Amino acid sequence: SQEPPPVPAERAFQPPAPPSVEPSQPGSRWGIGRAGKWLFFQGLKGLGRRAASVSASKVQPPKVPPMQKKKEDDECSSDPGRSGQSWCFPRSSKKVLTQVSSYEDPLREVEKEDPAIRALSLIAEVDQELELTRKCPLFEKRKIFRELQRRLHPDKNPEQAEAAKLAFQHLMDRSRTYLKN
């Protein structure tokens, strides 16, 4: 009369999911339907009367924030439409800064501080643009070259005058080879 060895908790019996439902990633929702209800009630087994409070917290979607108050300068519709709610179109919107949009790359900060590093990155950008447009017709090359001259001129970049000066000089050195037929 030997007893079987105890089964570890990880290998304990778990009811199989119905064949129409695949397990989801953490944080995602199960599909609504017969299979979803089956899984939901399997999770509530043994809770008894507590199941009502648990089911309310697990099943309900997050609450939608209340609608913005109507302002006199907004264009609003008093017709509730299908949803039963009124809707508004604000005339202007304000851009909200987030942590992601306000983040600056540390390399860019170094480039702002050191004009030689900034000049090298500008020269690399100029060389890349000139190389990409090398096969264009001459009149297109002249337009591109003029635009680069405007963009890199030291008077247009007073906050980075030294870097702009070096990049502009490099551009002017490349003019003969770039603008020839």
Image (cartoon, rainbow, N blue to C red):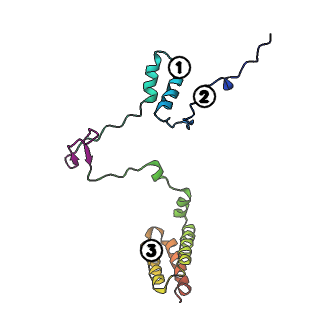
Q: Are marks 2 and 1 in contact (CB under 8 Å)?
A: no
Q: Secondary structure at mark 3?
A: helix
Query: Residue 95's mark?
Result: none
- The residue to which callout 2 is attached is 16
In the visual, does 4 lie left or right of 115?
Answer: right
In the visual, does 47 lie left or right of 73?
Answer: right
Q: Residue at x 49, y 73 (%)?
A: 164
Q: Are marks 1 and 3 in contact (CB under 8 Å)?
A: no
The residues tagged by marks 2 and 1 sit, at their Cα atoms, a distance apart of: 15 Å
Q: Amino acid at mark 3?
A: Arg
Mark 2 packing: few (<14 Cα in 10 Å), some, or many (20+)?
A: few
Q: What secondary structure characterizes most of the magenta part?
A: loop
Query: Residue 45's mark?
Result: 1
The residues tagged by marks 1 and 3 sit, at their Cα atoms, a distance apart of: 69 Å
- The residue to which callout 3 is attached is 151
Q: Residue at x 65, y 23 (%)?
A: 13
Mark 1 packing: few (<14 Cα in 10 Å), some, or many (20+)?
A: few
The furthest residue to the top:
1
Q: Amino acid at mark 1?
A: Lys
- Where residue 163 appears, as percent x and y from the top left, is 52, 71
- Where, quadrant-wise, is the N terminus in this rendering? top right
Magenta region: which residues?
71-89
**Is residue 72 on the magenta stretch?**
yes
**Is residue 12 on the magenta stretch?**
no
